[in-house]
Image: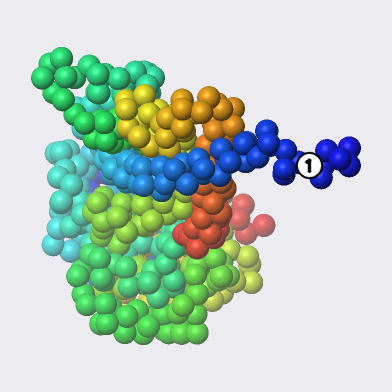
């Protein structure tokens, strides 16, 4: 046992593994910082705008808007994300619409986020007590003013935990972009593993990097929640 | 100032307001009393159209609303600007300080400059005894203080009528006095007030007129003396006996 431990770093097998981990680390982290994280941020932002619009359409009095929003959410939630990405990237070219991998990924993930997050935002808006609307109306506000000044700021605080959840989900889902040839972190991992055949090692390494990013995010979420605490009725 | 004609309101099959007539003169303080479910709060809420009646007409100031016709949103918003409302559980904006709560109407609705609105809001809050609490958030205030911020918010847009929906019902007994004092002061200054309350002493002391409602109808109305001492209707008497126990 003692022998084994003292030899662990000089053992040629072991040395090889460490080499693989170290040499693939930088490309993977690059993949995360240059591709995975920017893709996540962009699609989350676009998705959030879509989500707010969709939530407001669902809550509006106009039947047409309600139905457009319902159908959109139903289609996106009712079909696999992977299939949606394939339709956009591999399917659309056959009707003459060719979109590069990055834009295909942005469109696919944004539509997805928009649909899922619209339900979060709708629920958050509905969770604000009716009295807040009534008080806004009683001082002469229009619906839009009440929404902007009173309801949405409070709904934001309510929606942070579930939105963080979907943000973390999105980071991991961006690995699906590898299937439409977008070289984000996981695609990098696949490329590295394909040359050295150490699948377990390289994929585990990628998994650990995803995990570390998500730990960082949970930390940010806590801070944001604390800062927005005053926005909740107590 | 306020005229209500043939007002009818239904919640589904429930006929909650039955042919209500009411007049409130400028500067008058009208207190509406009655058992729970009598429709008094609903009546108050129709006055700024938080509830929409099915039939009838309400005139406040120069604006008239005829509920037999479809109403435009814009018309409702304009109509509401004439009245302020104080709610039973204050409904303050939790994400704003006391000062910001009071500034909100002037700044967002009336487009008054923030600096001006801040000065005015400070004055009003000082008047209701909260000059020290300008930067406190609602959850840092006691129930009575919250309700006084509510009154200040209702006053801030310079309305001529304030509607009070059981403003002291949710308060601890020892906090009721502060709120009633502020209301008395407003009454003395000539504010037109419609008050739904269970505080009979306030009604006796401050009201110009008391309206007793039961089962969606105005049963009896008159001066506090007429209602409390020279009660005519047996139903009013019954109600008063029950709450005086």
| Chain under callout 1 | A
- Decide: is A193 above or below B153: above
Q: Which residue is mark 1?
A: A7
**Element assignment for label 1:** helix
Q: How many marks?
A: 1
- Decide: is A10 above or below B2: above
A167 vs B48, left or right, is: right
Which is more toward the observer, B230 or A87? A87
Which is more toward the observer, B140 or B44? B140
Q: Residue at x 54, y 31 (%)?
A: A203
Which is more toward the observer, B57 or A171? A171
The quarter of the image holding the N terminus of chain A is top right
Q: Position of residue B180 (x, y in %)?
A: 50, 73
Q: Position of residue B210 (x, y in %)?
A: 41, 62
Q: Residue furthest right?
A: A1
Q: Residue at x 18, y 64 (%)?
A: B61
- Decide: is B126 above or below A48: below
Q: Residue furthest top?
A: A94
Q: Residue at x 51, y 50 (%)?
A: A217
Q: Residue at x 32, y 27 (%)?
A: A181
- Decide: is A109 above or below B139: above
Among the 4 quarters of the image, the one containing residue B62: bottom left
Q: Is residue B68 visible?
A: yes
Among the 4 quarters of the image, the one containing residue B115: bottom left
Mark 1 surroundings within 10 Å by alpha-carbon count, few (fewer than 14), some (14 through 19), many (20 or more) = few
């Amino acid at each position: 046992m003692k022998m084994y431990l003292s030899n662990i770093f000089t053992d040629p097998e072991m040395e090889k593994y460490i080499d693989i981990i170290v040499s693939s680390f930088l490309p993977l982290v690059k993949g995360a910082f240059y591709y995975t994280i920017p893709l996540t941020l962009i699609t989350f932002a676009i998705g959030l705008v879509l989500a707010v619009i969709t939530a407001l359409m669902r809550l509006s009095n106009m039947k047409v808007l309600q139905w457009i929003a319902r159908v959109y959410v139903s289609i996106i939630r009712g079909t696999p994300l992977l299939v949606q990405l394939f339709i956009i990237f591999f399917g659309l070219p056959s009707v003459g619409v060719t979109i590069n991998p990055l834009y295909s990924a942005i469109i696919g993930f944004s539509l997805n986020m928009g649909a899922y997050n619209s339900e979060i935002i709708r629920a958050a808006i509905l969770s604000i007590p009716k009295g807040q609307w009534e008080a806004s109306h009683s001082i002469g506000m229009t619906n839009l003013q009440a929404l902007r000044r009173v309801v949405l700021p409070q709904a934001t605080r309510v929606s942070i935990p579930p939105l963080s959840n979907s943000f973390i989900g999105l980071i991991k889902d961006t690995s699906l972009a590898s299937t439409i040839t977008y070289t984000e972190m996981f695609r990098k991992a696949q490329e590295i593993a394909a040359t050295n055949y150490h699948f377990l090692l390289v994929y585990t390494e990628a998994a650990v990097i995803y995990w570390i990013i998500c730990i960082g995010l949970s930390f940010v979420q806590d801070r944001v929640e604390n800062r927005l605490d005053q926005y909740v009725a107590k | 100032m306020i005229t209500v004609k043939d007002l009818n309101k239904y919640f589904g099959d429930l006929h909650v307001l039955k042919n209500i007539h009411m007049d409130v003169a400028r500067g008058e303080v009208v207190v509406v009393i009655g058992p729970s479910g009598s429709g008094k709060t609903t009546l108050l809420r129709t006055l700024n159209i938080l509830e929409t009646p099915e039939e009838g007409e309400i005139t406040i100031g120069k604006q008239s609303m005829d509920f037999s016709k479809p109403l435009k949103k814009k018309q409702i918003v304009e109509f509401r600007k004439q009245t302020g409302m104080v709610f039973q559980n204050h409904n303050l904006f939790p994400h704003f300080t006391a000062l910001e709560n009071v500034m909100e109407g002037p700044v967002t609705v009336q487009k008054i400059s923030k600096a001006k609105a801040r000065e005015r809001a400070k004055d009003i809050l000082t008047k209701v005894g909260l000059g020290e609490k300008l930067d406190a958030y609602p959850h840092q205030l006691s129930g009575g203080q919250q309700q006084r911020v509510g009154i200040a918010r209702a006053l801030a847009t310079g309305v001529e009528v304030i509607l009070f929906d059981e403003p002291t019902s949710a308060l601890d007994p020892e906090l009721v006095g502060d709120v009633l004092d502020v209301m008395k002061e407003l009454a003395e200054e000539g504010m037109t007030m419609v008050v739904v309350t269970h505080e009979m002493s306030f009604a006796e002391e401050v009201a110009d007129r008391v309206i007793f409602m039961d089962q969606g109808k105005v049963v009896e109305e008159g001066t506090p003396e007429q209602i409390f001492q020279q009660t005519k209707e047996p139903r009013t008497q019954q109600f008063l006996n029950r709450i005086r126990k």
